[in-house]
Every structure is written in C-alpha cells, then in structure tokens.
Image: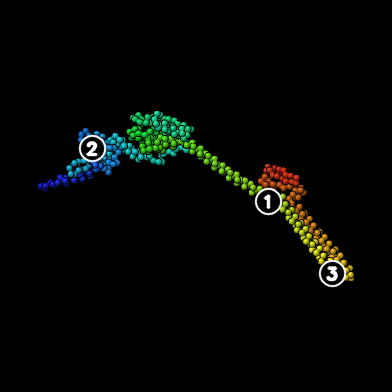
C-alpha cells in the first residue's frame, strides 16, 4: 500500500491558496464591517460578517485610495475581492479591490445591468434620436410643479425668450409612485401632441432619489415618444437611463431651458448685423447701377447724330482757318515780291527801261490779282462743297426733307417692319419733334 503524500504546513497553506485563487477569482460580497484597523502603512484590515459567519479581509493602500466610502464599524458594504490564504498564519481571507455602500452598490449593479441590456436592444443608438426643431414656440415640461427644476427652467426662459409658452405635465420625481406618474405624464403629452419639445427634468439627488428615471418601462416609453425629448435629470455628474434614451441630454434643467430658447439679445444683434449687411449690399448695388448708367449715357452721347454733326462742323472750321492762313501767306509773299521788283526798278531807273518795266509790272500785278481771285474762288468752292456734303449726310437734313427715324422701345433703329411685333410701340422722330406709334396687325397685312 502506497503512502499518502506528506506536506509541510507551509506547503499545505501554499497549495490551499492556489486552489482558492484559481477556483474563485473575483467575487462580490455584502457584509458588515467590524474590527476595522488602519495602521500607518495605509492598508486597511477588517472583518466582514453577517448573522451566521465572518471572514477576515484586507484592502491595500493602492486600492483603498480609490474607495468611495470610509469604512466604519457596523457599516454595510458591497465589496469586490479575491479569495486567498495568508500563509504565515493559515488564515482564510479576502483581498478587497473595490468597496462601496451596500445600498448604493446594489442599485448601481441594477443600473449597470439595465444599461447594458437596453444598449444591446438599441435604445441608445444615435440613428433613433430625433433632432430638435429649429423653431420652438411651445415647450412641455414633465416634472414636479413645486420643485426647483421648474423654477430654474421658467427663470431661464423668462430671461432669454419670454415668448416661449410652457406647458407643465405634473408628476412626482421621487418615490414609489413616481414611475407610474412619469409614464402617465409622458403618455398624456404624446396624446395631446401640443408641444414642440418635451423636457424630462428634476433637480439633483442621490442614486436612490433619481432611481425612478432608471426604469425600463420609462426607457421604452421615451424611445417610442414621437415628440423630441430632452433629459435634464440631476446635476452634470448624474447620469440616468433616461439620459441615454432621450434624444438630447442636458447637464442641468437650466441648460435644457437654454437649449430650447433663443437669447433675445443674440437675435437682436443678429438682426442688426443683417440690417448692416443689407445696407452695405444696397449701397454697392446702387453705386454699380449709377456707374452703369453713366457709362451708357456717355456711349449714347458719343453715338448721337448731333455729336457727329458737331465734329464735322468743327472740321469745316479747321479747314476754313487753314485756307485763310494759306491766303494770308500767299498775299505776304506777293507783297514781298512786289516790293523786291519795285526796288529793282528803282535801281534800274534809266528812262528807256521804265515803260517796258511799267508794262511788265502791270501785267504781273494783273496776273497776281487774277491768281489771288482764282485761289479765293477755289477755296470758296471747296468750302461750299464741304458744307453741302455735310448737309447731305446729316440725318437732321434728311429728316427736314420729310423723312423720319423709327426706333423700337429699346432704342434699336427699325429698318424693316418685321423687326416689330404686333401691338409693339415705337418712336418716330421727324423734323419738328418726336411721337410714339404702335404697330397693328392690320398694318402688317397691308
């Protein structure tokens, strides 16, 4: 017969520790604290007990620094711990990793379980959330009519946008009856369908105070609500199931009121900015139109027949001035030649040459006068011809002979009746003025 294995005490305790640690891992326990000790090392040592048993526990400094509660004798706590053996003494004990108040801890567990369940069902999905309306004129509030939340909401709306109408759907927001009242208020708001957005709100509190907003039935009712819902439950650090299901989560009731209202000062400032931009745009348009009008007026003046006639008249004046200057130069030259000839005659004074010279002089003088007359006649004829040509090409002269200039309402020159539509008005310019006429279908037929 083989002998059983023989252990030392240390070996046995080590084997038991490994079996316990591998077999259990992390576990959750509820118990009452007793024999609490906190030596200078910073570690905590205490006993967890209930009415039937007790177990020793230790919570080392690196873990207890994150604890939300300070252990006290007789306190009921919820802990997460690992089961082990303290080998030197063979003590069966717990190494605590997390500790919280037992009541809050159980609620937190239920909260986390429901949160994971509803998230898996898709109640928190962003694609199911409705956007807030761009124009909100009526707001529904599901809350206690005497609580601090409704006072904060009304104060913010009065300050920012007094025109927003508020309809209160009263409900308890704490206690056993609160869940049914919240469901009834939400159902009534959906049936009446008289508001643009709903605020589900209450002030801050503990997890127990806010527990009615962690109800599964309320979560499904919020998810199926056709009206956009803003959840504003508690303070900024408080999160409930309603916050995750609602279309929008506001950190506080006051913040929710700001979301559904527009600051009148901002609206007024925006209107002032828009008015200023409109004035600037009008000034730019006005300046552009004035410049365009001046441009077309200048072009019209350049193309006007009167302008061309003036230019031609100015050209005639320039030609006349040049002809007069040429005549004056010719006369001066003739006088100079005459003076020169006279001086030569005086230098050749002999009597026998005087008569021929006088005769020659008379001939030259006659030829000179004849040349001058011919030149004058030539320039006078040229001047008269130029004036006559100008008169011939002048549209005013043409009009004076009984012709007329026909233009459409757009100012286009009409050369063919087909350019005008039936019943279209046109202007007729004659020698003594201008009048308007209208083309008729009878005229076209003729």
Q: Residues within 10 Å of mark 3 (few under 14, many from 20)?
A: few
37 in relation to 398, above or below: above
The image shows residue 303 at horizontal and vertical percentages of 68, 51
Q: Residues within 10 Å of mark 2 (few under 14, many from 20)?
A: some
424 in relation to 191, above or below: below
Closer to the camera in the image, 240 or 364: 364
Mark 1–mark 3 CB contact (< 8 Å): no
Q: Residue at x 85, y 70 (%)?
A: 348
Please say whether residue 92 is visible from this viewpoint.
Answer: yes
Q: Which residue is mark 3?
A: 347
Q: Residue at x 18, y 46 (%)?
A: 14
| Label annotation for residue 302 | 1
Please say whether residue 26 is visible from this viewpoint.
Answer: no
Q: Earlier in the sequence, mark 3 or mark 2?
A: 2
Closer to the camera in the image, 336 or 347: 347
> Gap between marks 2 and 1, in whole Å?
109 Å
Q: Which residue is mark 2?
A: 36
- Residue 294 horizontal side relative to residue 43, left or right: right
Q: How many numbered marks, from 0 up?
A: 3
The image shows residue 90 at horizontal and vertical percentages of 17, 42
> Gap between marks 3 and 2, in whole Å?
161 Å
Mark 2–mark 1 CB contact (< 8 Å): no
Closer to the camera in the image, 427 or 160: 160
Q: Residue at x 84, y 69 (%)?
A: 347
């Amino acid at each position: 017969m083989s002998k059983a294995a023989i252990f030392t005490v240390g070996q046995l305790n080590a084997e038991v520790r490994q079996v316990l640690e591998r077999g259990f891992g992390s576990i959750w326990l509820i118990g009452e604290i007793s024999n609490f000790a906190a030596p200078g090392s910073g570690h905590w040592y205490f006993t967890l007990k209930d009415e039937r048993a007790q177990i020793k526990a230790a919570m080392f400094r690196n873990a207890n620094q994150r604890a939300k509660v300070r252990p006290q004798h007789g306190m009921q706590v919820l802990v997460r711990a690992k089961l082990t053996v303290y080998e030197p003494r063979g003590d069966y004990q717990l190494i605590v990793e997390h500790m919280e108040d037992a009541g809050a801890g159980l609620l937190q567990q239920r909260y986390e379980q429901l949160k994971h369940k509803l998230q898996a069902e898709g109640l928190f999905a962003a694609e199911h959330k409705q956007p807030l309306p761009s124009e909100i004129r009526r707001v529904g509030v599901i809350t206690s009519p005497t609580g601090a939340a409704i006072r904060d909401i009304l104060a913010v709306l009065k300050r920012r946008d007094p025109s927003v109408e508020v309809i209160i759907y009263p409900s308890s927001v704490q206690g056993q009856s609160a869940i049914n009242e919240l469901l009834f208020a939400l159902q009534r708001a959906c049936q009446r369908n008289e508001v643009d957005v709903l605020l589900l709100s209450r002030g801050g509190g503990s997890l127990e105070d806010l527990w009615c907003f962690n109800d599964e039935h309320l979560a499904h009712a919020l998810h199926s609500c056709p009206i956009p819902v803003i959840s504003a439950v508690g303070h900024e650090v408080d999160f409930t199931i309603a916050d995750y299901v609602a279309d929008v989560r506001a950190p506080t009731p006051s913040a929710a009121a700001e979301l559904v209202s527009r600051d009148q000062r901002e609206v007024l400032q925006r209107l002032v900015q828009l008015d200023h931009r409109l004035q600037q745009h009008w000034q730019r348009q006005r300046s552009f139109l004035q410049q365009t009008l001046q441009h077309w007026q200048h072009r019209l003046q350049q193309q006007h027949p009167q302008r061309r006639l003036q230019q031609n008249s100015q050209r005639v004046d320039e030609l006349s001035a040049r002809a007069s200057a040429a005549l004056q130069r010719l006369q001066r030259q003739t006088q100079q030649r005459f003076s020169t000839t006279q001086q030569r005659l005086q230098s050749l004074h002999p009597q026998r040459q005087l008569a021929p010279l006088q005769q020659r002089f008379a001939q030259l003088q006659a030829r000179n006068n004849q040349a001058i007359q011919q030149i004058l006649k030539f320039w006078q004829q040229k001047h008269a011809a130029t004036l006559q040509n100008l008169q011939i090409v002048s549209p005013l002269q043409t009009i004076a002979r009984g012709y007329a200039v026909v233009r459409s309402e757009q100012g286009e020159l009409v050369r063919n009746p087909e350019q005008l539509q039936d019943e279209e008005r046109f202007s007729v310019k004659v020698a003594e003025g201008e009048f308007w006429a209208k083309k008729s279908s009878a005229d076209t037929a003729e």
